[in-house]
Amino acid sequence: MGDVKRTSLPHDFLWGVSTSSYQIEGAAQADGRGPSVWDAYCRVLGHVANSDTGDVACDHYHRYREDIALMKDIGVGAYRFSVSWPRVLPTGRGQANEAGLAFYDRLIDGLLAAKIEPWLCLYHWDLPQVLQDQGGWLNRDIAGWFGDYAQLIATRFGDRVGRFATFNEPSVFTLFGYGFAWHPPGATDPAGLYKATHHVNLAHGAGVDALRTYSPSALVGAIHNMQPVRPVSRTVADEAAATLLDEHWNKVFPEAQILGRYPPMLARAIEPYMQPGDLARICRQPDWFGVNHYSPVYAKADANAPLGFAWADAPADVPRSPIGWQMDPAAFRDTLIDVHRRYRLPIYVLENGAGAVEKPDAAGVIDDRERVGYLSDYTDALREAIAAGADVRGYFVWSLLDNFEWGAGYDNRFGLFYVDYQTQRRIPKASARWYAQLIRSERTGVAR
Ligand code: IFM
């Protein structure tokens, strides 16, 4: 990357950290929480490494005060978290669970007291199991259920929360859940995927409407994983595979939600599940665009795969993070510039980070210099994107804490703080200190 360290950022640039409910809260049976699809999915042998579950996770439900103190220590200005739908609506709809809502009251009040802005995401994959039993994302009624849930959350927290997201990475939970069976409900069902995709988009529209009606001053958006999709070879078949994966991964949600259209290949596939007026129900001008980005992804044609394509490995010689994900900060810069050109919205990077399998050394220290290198290179790329005109207004590291990494269980760690799952002790890694120093130097204008 070029010499970008001195590219100045807007004075109100927002530095944050992100987490999600199922990945950190634990307390799976506490205070009336209902089961989510992940509770059930984790219990099937072979779905999650080591048969790990989110039952306890980081016990954030009980330790949120300590976790807010960690955020305060590193100096972040914002915290993005998600609400667990089954914690606040154990039966998915209808009767709210006051104890579950009260947890988020305490969390939000604690954040505000620490001068940390709460960014609330409604859905980070933990659908109430009871709604899954009624068809989940395959049931068109779910758009209304989601709208009602959004109304509850906006009514309860809109006096203190100014930023709401409807969904986190809708393309991940739909594609992995219905295309590749890597997430609940564990299906490989193309028709189900197209239907679920459309219903998630309808739910987004209903959610935005509810958030704006019941919290009129809220700034509302959605969070999309945006990553260049590259063909594994230059064959026509692999190029076509990459184009199709790109539509699923990068386009089918933001284009419908912001531009009011489906990308061409998926438009044909989704058409049978659409009713007149649907795109008008989905398309809402958001106040901001959330980008999650880690690395480029690769596609190859696969005639035996349900969708006709498969994921492929990055070329052998590329730089990689400790868990093998390609590191390509230029792709991050280009993604931000591309999102800016396509959507012309304020951009917030709401996830970026590096995974590792790590443990403290004999002295109890976690010297995660690879993660520091990754974050340093990627924040430099962010500066380049801003220098090139991209309207990027914030950057949130994934993640505050090591946590439940879905199918990888607790093996892959993304935290700035190490979590000892036996004792629940949090230990700052070198990257936590690095991030604190970055934020401090940006605030004071002192060069790093
Ligand atoms: O842990 C996940 C998160 O839930 C969604 N985005 C990617 C992260 C790392 O895999």
Image (cartoon, rainbow, N blue to C red):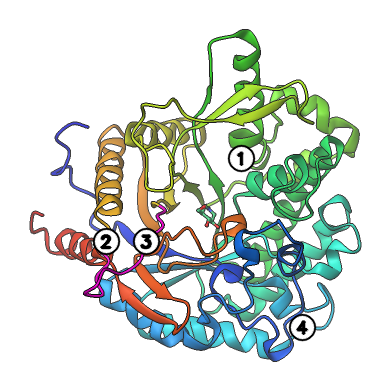
**Label 3 crowd (10 A; few <14 / some 14-19 / many >=20):** some
Q: Which residue is mark 4?
A: 96
Q: Which residues are magenta?
A: 355-366
Determine whether 1 is above or below 198 in the image.
Answer: above
Q: Magenta stretch: residue 340 in it?
A: no
Residue 358: image tag:
3
Quarter occupied by residue 242: top right
Label 3 near label 1: C-beta < 8 Å? no
Disc with the residue nearer the chain's start (3 vs 4): 4
Would residue 64 appear left or right of 271 to someone viewing this image?
A: left
Q: Nearer the viewer, mark 2 or mark 1?
A: 2
Q: Nearer the viewer, mark 2 or mark 3?
A: 3
Q: Calculate the distance from the C-alpha at mark 1 to the C-alpha at mark 3.
A: 35 Å
Q: Position of residue 50 (x, y in %)?
A: 61, 63
Would residue 242 appear left or right of 65 to someone viewing this image?
A: right
Q: Which residue is mark 2?
A: 431
Q: Which residue is mark 1?
A: 254
Residue at 8%, 54% in the rendered image = 447
Q: Amino acid at mark 3?
A: Glu
Label 1 near label 2: C-beta < 8 Å? no
Label 4 near label 1: C-beta < 8 Å? no
Q: Amino acid at mark 4?
A: Ala
Q: Nearer the viewer, mark 4 or mark 2?
A: 2
Which sits in the foreground, 330 or 303?
Answer: 303
Residue at 55%, 83% in the rendered image = 61
Quarter occupied by residue 150: bottom right
Q: Amino acid at mark 2?
A: Ser
